[in-house]
Image (tube, rainbow, N blue to C red):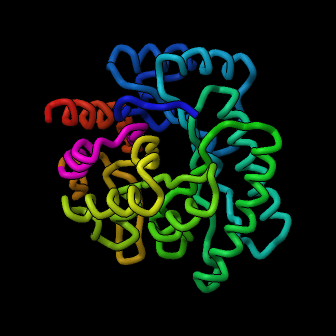
């Protein structure tokens, strides 16, 4: 696995300035803006031709690459074939991402579907074992990371994600701070709350989770039912400045992915603020 000497600020997908351009133009924009890399967005399916994989892998020597799995994943579906398809989508994401030089993949793992927390946890764990078996057998070398989710109907609160990470060597959390904030309809937005998240991560999973970090951040709109949509940071109540301070104080290394609608501008905003501290 890759090791990091700093926190890298990367975009969720190709920068908007890429327009209809390709990965070549995307990396030119990242370089020009002095950003650190990008998350490959496989949210509508894992598609990336061999030429693009080779190009991005070459770029991964200088940039940090992660990947986001498809949205159609539910390891707790009531239908067996949908569970199988979900498992396969995560494996496909890991396989292609690894070939493209990514160090980590993330995905929204499951919905509760009316089930109780323990039953759903055990189901997610069982399916995660299937994923890990294939990944180990095929020697796919990426971190597998279920993401903290933005709605109480989705499996993936902070404890669930941390507990699953303790069960498997290749699993680590992807902490989406905006989702934690939206899921709780406004909590997880203070200096102390951010600090507690990282303390918990370091204490329960281990210091390597702080030094191989993969997280998401954006502005977010939410209701009592959780996440509604992503917003630009300055148009939201997301207290990103205190979060950035905490990430710096804890010596977090790895990747923070900016998922704001104005992807690269907020990514730059975060990196510049981090460097100003």
Residue at image x 20%, y 30%?
Answer: 275
Q: Is residue 85 left or right of residue 207?
A: right
Residue at image x 71%, y 73%?
Answer: 123
- Magenta stretch containing residue 257, yes or no? yes
Relative to residue 132, is residue 121 depicted above or below?
below
Nearer the observer, 152 or 100: 100
Residue at image x 85%, y 64%?
Answer: 81
Nearer the observer, 233 or 179: 179
Picture coordinates of residue 104, whole percent (x, y): 57, 40
**Exactly how many numbered labels are in the figure?**
0
Picture coordinates of residue 185, whole percent (x, y): 33, 72
Relative to residue 272, is residue 258 depicted above or below?
below
> What's the magenta region?
242-258
Picture coordinates of residue 31, whole percent (x, y): 39, 15
Q: Is residue 248 left or right of residue 122?
A: left
Picture coordinates of residue 191, whole percent (x, y): 19, 59
- Magenta stretch containing residue 58, yes or no? no
Can the viewer see residue 234?
no
Residue at image x 28%, y 30%?
Answer: 268
Image quadrant holding the C terminus, namely top left
Q: Is residue 242 left or right of residue 97?
A: left
Image quadrant holding the N terminus, namely top right
Residue 220: image quadrant is bottom left
Can the viewer see residue 39?
yes
Residue 47: image quadrant is top right
Q: Residue furthest right?
A: 81
Nearer the observer, 246 or 156: 246
């Amino acid at each position: 696995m890759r090791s990091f000497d700093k926190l890298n600020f990367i975009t969720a997908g190709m920068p908007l300035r890429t327009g209809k351009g390709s990965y070549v133009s995307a990396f030119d924009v990242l370089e020009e803006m002095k950003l650190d890399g990008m998350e490959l967005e496989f949210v509508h399916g894992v598609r990336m031709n061999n030429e693009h994989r080779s190009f991005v892998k070459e770029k991964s020597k200088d940039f940090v690459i992660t990947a986001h799995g498809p949205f159609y994943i539910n390891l707790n579906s009531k239908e067996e074939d949908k569970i199988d398809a979900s498992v396969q989508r995560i494996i496909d994401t890991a396989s292609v991402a690894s070939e493209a030089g990514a160090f980590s993949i993330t995905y929204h793992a499951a919905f509760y579907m009316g089930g109780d927390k323990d039953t759903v946890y055990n189901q997610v764990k069982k399916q995660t074992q299937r994923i890990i078996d294939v990944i180990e057998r095929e020697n796919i070398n990426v971190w597998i990371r279920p993401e903290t989710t933005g709605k109480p109907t989705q499996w993936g609160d902070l404890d669930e994600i941390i507990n699953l990470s303790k069960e498997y060597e290749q699993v680590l959390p992807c902490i989406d701070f905006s989702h934690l904030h939206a899921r709780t309809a406004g909590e997880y937005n203070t200096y102390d709350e951010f600090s507690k998240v990282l303390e918990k991560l370091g204490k329960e999973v281990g210091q390597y989770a702080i030094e191989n970090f993969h997280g998401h951040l954006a502005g977010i709109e939410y209701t009592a039912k959780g996440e509604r949509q992503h917003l630009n940071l300055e148009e939201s109540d997301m207290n990103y400045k205190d979060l950035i301070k905490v990430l710096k104080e804890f010596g977090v290394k790895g990747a923070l992915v900016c998922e704001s609608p104005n992807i690269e501008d907020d990514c730059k905003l975060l990196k510049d603020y981090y460097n100003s501290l």
